[in-house]
Amino acid sequence: MLSAGLPQGAVPKLERPGPLRERVYVALLELITTRALRPGQHLVESELAGHLGVSRQPVREALQRLNTEGWVDLRPAQGAFVHEPTEEEADQLLTVRTLLEAEAARLAAANAGSAGIAALEALCEKGEQAVADGDVDLVVATNAEFHAKVMQLAGNLVLSELAGRVDQRVRWYYTPVARQRGKQSWIEHRELIAAISDRDEQRATQVMRAHTEHTRRTYHQRENG
């Protein structure tokens, strides 16, 4: 067990060739967003390097980039730590997410065809099964897929680009509340699919706004620990 808190074998050693600096960055970001590395956790360069099977240099570069992007805090004389988001940070981001996704839902209702609706239904079934199986990681990943599909069906590239900037942080905030949201979240997804299928833009907007607001409130009411 690393003092960084990762069980041995949790992350495969990175294979070469490839842009190693980028691959280390992606690996560490994935560990942070899935909370395998938890907020406030100390990140030791040498241990992360050993775990990933690389030298310390690409790990150091990745940590510096993650610090610039707000995922990691570099503290003088203490080292690197996973950033601990404040309630205000989370609230601001989840509020922006509501605005973006409500508009995406409206556009999806206007533009989606039968194939897109079928894809949403398939993802919903996948998510419902993950909830039934208690597979939180799969629930979080499938939730992200579902929302990304709605965004794709909206057909607005600028909106999609803006949403892409917040997607990983949404996943970060959603992970600790996924179990609490559980089945209800997927019931709301079903309501959204029905509105999109009916081409009811107003209803789709309302359902998505309520859905993302439920997640925001659940995050603030979550049980810490």
Image (cartoon, rainbow, N blue to C red):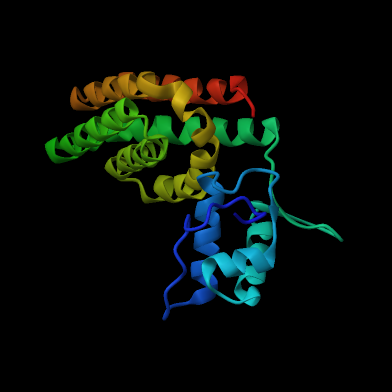
Measuring 46% from the left and 36% from the top, which residue is drawn there? 100
Number of marks in the rendered image:
0
In the picture as drawn, the residue positioned furthest to the left comes out as 114
Return the x and y of residue 173 as percentages of the image width and height: 55, 36
Q: Is residue 105 visible?
A: yes
In the picture as drawn, the residue positioned furthest to the bottom comes out as 17
Indicate whether 125 appears above or below 73: above
Measuring 28% from the left and 27% from the top, which residue is drawn there? 128
Indicate whether 53 appears above or below 89: below
In the picture as drawn, the residue positioned furthest to the front comes out as 1
Return the x and y of residue 190 as percentages of the image width and height: 27, 22
Return the x and y of residue 51 as percentages of the image width and height: 55, 65
| Left or right relative to 172: residue 143 | left
Q: Which of the 4 image quadrants contains residue 89?
A: top right
Foreground of the two, 127 or 210: 127
Measuring 48% from the left and 41% from the top, which residue is drawn there? 171
Which quadrant is home to the C terminus? top right
| Left or right relative to 180: residue 93 | right
Return the x and y of residue 75 as percentages of the image width and height: 81, 56
Foreground of the two, 225 or 146: 225
Q: Which of the 4 image quadrants contains residue 149?
A: top left
Foreground of the two, 16 or 213: 16
In the picture as drawn, the residue positioned furthest to the right comes out as 77
Which quadrant is home to the N terminus? bottom right
Q: Is residue 202 visible?
A: no
